[in-house]
Amino acid sequence: MMRPSDGAMQVILLITAGVVLGMLVTLVVQRIVRHRRELRRAELDQRIRPLVLTATVVEDDEVDALLEQVRTLPAAERAHVRRTVFHMLRDVTGEAADRLRAVGDAAGLVPRIFAATGHRAPSTRADAAEALGLVRPPGALDALCVLAVDPVPEVRTVAIRALGSFTEPEAIDLVVGALATESGVPGSVAASALLQQGGAASDRVRRALDDPDAGVRHGAARVAGLLQAPGAAEVLARLVDDPSEPVRLAAIRSLERLPASSAVPSLLRTALSDDPAGEAAAATLAAMPAVWAGDALAQLDAQGGAAVRRAAGLRRQDAA
C-alpha cells in the first residue's frame, strides 16, 4: 500500500485543522448566541413579570387598561407575557388565575395553544394539553378529548391530567377509561384527575367498580372512599374477594372511609388468611363500628397472627 506524499499529508492536515477550527468557531458562536438570548430573556423578565403580577392585584376598574397595555406591547414582549402566564398558572388559583388567563388572552396565548394541539412534535402537543387545562378557553374540552386519545402515551397522560379541571360527562368518561390496564396512562394520574373532578365523578366511579378491566376497578376502588361515592360501599365489599390483589387492597382501604357491614365476613376471612392484604383488612375491621365488627375482632384476636392483631390494634396474647 502506497503512503501519501508529503504534499498530500499537508493537505489532509490542513483540511482536518480547518474542520476542527470550524467546529470550535461554531461552538463559540452557539454559546454567544445562547448567552445573549438568556440575557435578553432576563431583561424581558425584569420588565414583563411585574406587569403580569400586577394583573393579580389590580383593581377591577383598572383591568381593561392593563389588558390594553398588554395588547400594544411589541411581539417579543407579548411572547414573553405568554410564557410567563403559562408558568405562573401552574401555581395560581382562584380570581388571580382568572386575571392571568385574561392577560394571556390579551397577549394572544389562546390561538397559539390551539395551533399547538396539531403540531407534529409530541412534546409540543403535550405542552398544549397542559396549557388547555390551565387556561381553559372555550373549546378546550373538545381539544383535550382529542388529545386524550393521542397515539403518543405521554400526550395522553398530560391530557388526562388536564381533564381533571373539567366535570363534564365526556371528560369523566375519558379519565375513567384511562384507568384501564393497557391505556398507557399511569393509574395514579387518572386517579388524581378523578379526585380533582370530585363529586361530579362519584356516580361514574361507582359504576367503574364493576368494570371488566382490573385496572379500572383498581383505580375506582382507590378513589371511591376518598370521594365518599354514594352506593359504592356495597360494591367495595364485594371487591374484597376480587381475583386481583391490587383491587382487593384498594377496596379494603376505601372501606375504612366508606364502611359497609356486609364487608365484615370477607375482611375477617382475608385477615385470617395468608393474603398480602390481611393487615389492611384487620385495620379496616378495627375502624368499623363495634356493633358490626366486634365479633370479628374477637375471632381475629383469638386466631390471628401477631401482624394482623397488631394492625387491628389488639393486645399481644402474651400480654393479656
Image: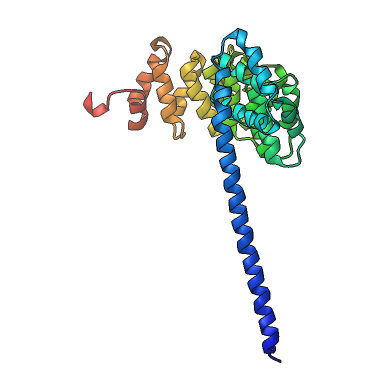
Say if residue 218 shows up in the picture. Answer: no
Please count the marks in the image. Answer: 0
- Based on the displayed image, in which of its 4 quarters is residue 192 positioned? top right
**256 or 21, which lies in front?**
21
Say if residue 248 shows up in the picture. Answer: yes
Residue at 69% from the left image edge and 89% from the top image edge: 5
Whether residue 311 sits left or right of residue 151 in the image: it is left
Whether residue 54 sits left or right of residue 284 in the image: it is right
**240 or 172, which lies in front?**
172
Q: Position of residue 181 (x, y in %)?
A: 64, 35
Q: Quadrant of the N terminus?
A: bottom right
Q: Quadrant of the C terminus?
A: top left
- Based on the displayed image, in which of its 4 quarters is residue 62 positioned? top right
**59 or 231, which lies in front?**
59
User: Looking at the image, what colour scheme do you see?
Assistant: rainbow
Residue at 40% from the left image edge and 9% from the top image edge: 291
Residue at 58% from the left image edge and 20% from the top image edge: 196
Q: Position of residue 148 (x, y in %)?
A: 71, 31
Q: Residue furthest bottom?
A: 2
Residue at 61% from the left image edge and 58% from the top image edge: 27
